[in-house]
Amino acid sequence: ETGVTQSPTHLIKTRGQQVTLRCSSQSGHNTVSWYQQALGQGPQFIFQYYREEENGRGNFPPRFSGLQFPNYSSELNVNALELDDSALYLCASSLVGSEAFFGQGTRLTVV
Amino acid sequence: SQQGEEDPQALSIQEGENATMNCSYKTSINNLQWYRQNSGRGLVHLILIRSNEREKHSGRLRVTLDTSKKSSSLLITASRAADTASYFCATDRDNAGNMLTFGGGTRLMVKP
């Protein structure tokens, strides 16, 4: 167990809908990153939050947005869902310069 | 796009044999990390090697890093059926910390 928890574990959404995924960081970690992993591929970096501010972003459109709260928990929001958004979404928490600890992921299916 | 590329994409060995996986990357790095993933679930951190290190050990794992060749290898010695999983290398693209770029992974099967 890494101490990083994600919810929900699975969900199904319809194309065009919006979804919010949640992540609780490991205690003491002030950095949270989100990744998208399509089936059979490696994870792709979406963005990172550090002390409630977006600290870096990968090659994802603005309909992917996030928040980090004062307790360092985080949300990933995806608007206008597309079929290609179906993937495993992984959250990772860390301290700067140290290894990242991942949650078990949220499996999102868009139909 | 993915910076790291693992080789081979798939590997099947017998229990007790050693497994070697390789990773190549394209840009300069701060560190390189190896992760394991079972059945499409969360990633488990195995080992982190910094750019100024050449080799690191953790239990049955041995990781090497050659920054001149932009490559790393993960060796699992005396493999067990429980080692069956996908293995990913990930590079920390800058010094901001853990904005990781992953390769496509090596799917390892260890037969009992």
Image: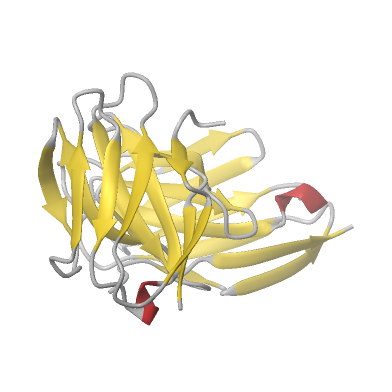
Q: Is A78 placed above or below B57 here?
A: below
**Outermost residue to the top:** A28
Quadrant position of residue A93: top left
Q: In front here: B68 or A35?
A: A35
Q: Is A6 placed above or below B81 here?
A: above
Q: Answer whether residue B80 is visible to the viewer in this image.
A: no
Left or right: A93 as drawn, with respect to B72: left
Left or right: B66 as drawn, with respect to B1: right
Q: Answer whether residue B40 is visible to the viewer in this image.
A: yes
Q: Residue at x 44, y 34 (%)?
A: A4
**Outermost residue to the right:** B112
Quadrant position of residue A45: bottom left
Q: Residue at x 52, y 72 (%)?
A: B7
Q: Residue at x 24, y 50 (%)?
A: B99
Q: Position of residue A1 (x, y in %)?
A: 57, 31
Count the numbered circles shown.
0
